[in-house]
């Protein structure tokens, strides 16, 4: 089994850009798609990025995803931060032995 | 627009079996495009994948829960279900059902809170 490790929290000012990392402990990050979910307080999660860098309909292009094989990690980048982006963000991936693994979540504070 | 709604008891006694149902509206559970999943989230903690079921009834469970989990699908009612045996306080969580187009979740239910207490 593998783990996905995220920073516990990040913070940034409105209008700025923030990047959240998700590091895979074993196996190759590029071998299986990575998804990112946003969860605002008191709400169900929603998908902001799927299959590494795809945005579901309705998600603004301020959200982008990428993969870095050299660090075996995925990243979620949010530009033009607004207070509405304040939430917990989870990465998720899989492999053949355990279909789905979630990262521990990163709390984004927009100061 | 497809919507998912979880239902079931909010309170379960220790050692008992949790039974939850997810009702799919606005779309068919027999679609071959999707899996149907359960995910849970203990209060103040992260997400945990429980398992998934396909319209054929084929299942795949989280190895950490596999011995206690059973999922089923009722195409006549457009519902799928979760049973989790031998409940303990560690199983207290918000339980979400979700629609999965293979690799990601495109529709989440609102979640149902489950407390484990005698």
Image (spheres, rainbow, N blue to C red):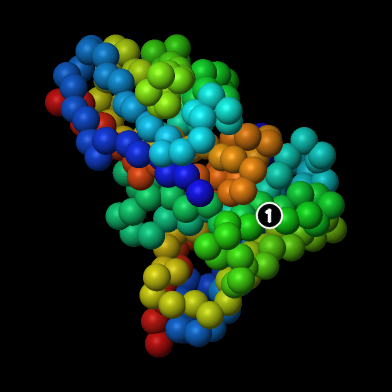
Residue A109 image offset from top left, x and y in percent = 21, 31
What residue is shown with label 1? B60
Label 1 element class: strand
Whether residue B11 can be seen here? yes
- The quadrant of the image that shows the N terminus of chain B is top right
Of all chains, the one bearing label 1 is B
What residue sits 22% from the left and 36% below the top? A9
Query: Image quadrant of residue B74?
Result: bottom right
Q: Residue at x 43, y 50 (%)?
A: B47
Task: Indicate whether B64 appears above or below A76.
Answer: below
Tell me if A20 is positioned left or right of B78 in this view: left
Crowd tier of the residue under label 1, counting other residues whose Cα lies within 10 Å: few below 14, some 14–19, many 20 or above: some
Which residue is at the front of the view, B106 or A5? A5
Residue at the extreme bottom: B118
At horizontal 26% and vertical 14% (from top left) the residue drawn is A17
Query: x%, y% of residue B49?
Result: 53, 52
Q: In the visual, does B97 lie left or right of A69?
A: right
Q: Quadrant of the C terminus of chain B?
A: bottom left
Q: Residue sitting at 82 percent across and 46 percent down?
A: B30
Q: Is residue B77 visible?
A: no
Q: Position of residue A62 (x, y in %)?
A: 39, 13
Quarter occupied by residue A45: top left
- Where residue B95 appears, x then y in whole percent? 50, 58
Name above or below for residue A19 compared with residue B40: above
């Amino acid at each position: 089994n593998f783990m996905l490790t995220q920073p516990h929290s990040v913070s940034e000012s409105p209008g700025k850009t923030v990047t959240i990392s998700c590091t895979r402990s074993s196996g190759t990050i590029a071998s299986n798609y990575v998804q990112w979910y946003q969860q605002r307080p008191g709400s169900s999660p929603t998908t902001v990025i799927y299959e590494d860098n795809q945005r579901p309909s309705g998600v603004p292009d301020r959200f982008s995803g990428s993969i870095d094989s050299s660090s075996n990690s995925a990243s979620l980048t949010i530009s033009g931060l607004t207070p509405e982006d304040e939430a917990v963000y989870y990465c998720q991936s899989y492999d053949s032995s355990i279909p789905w693994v979630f990262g521990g979540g990163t709390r984004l504070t927009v100061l | 627009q497809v919507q998912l709604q979880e239902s079931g008891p909010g309170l379960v006694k220790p050692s008992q079996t949790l039974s939850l149902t997810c009702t799919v509206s606005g779309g068919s559970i027999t679609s071959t495009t999707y899996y149907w999943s359960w995910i849970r989230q203990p209060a103040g903690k992260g997400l945990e994948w429980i398992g998934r079921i396909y319209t054929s009834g084929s299942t795949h469970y989280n190895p950490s829960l596999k011995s206690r989990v059973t999922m089923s699908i009722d195409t006549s009612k457009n519902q799928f279900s979760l049973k989790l045996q031998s409940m303990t306080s560690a199983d207290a969580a918000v339980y979400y059902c979700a629609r999965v187009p293979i690799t990601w979740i495109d529709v989440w239910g609102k979640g149902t809170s489950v407390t484990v207490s005698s």
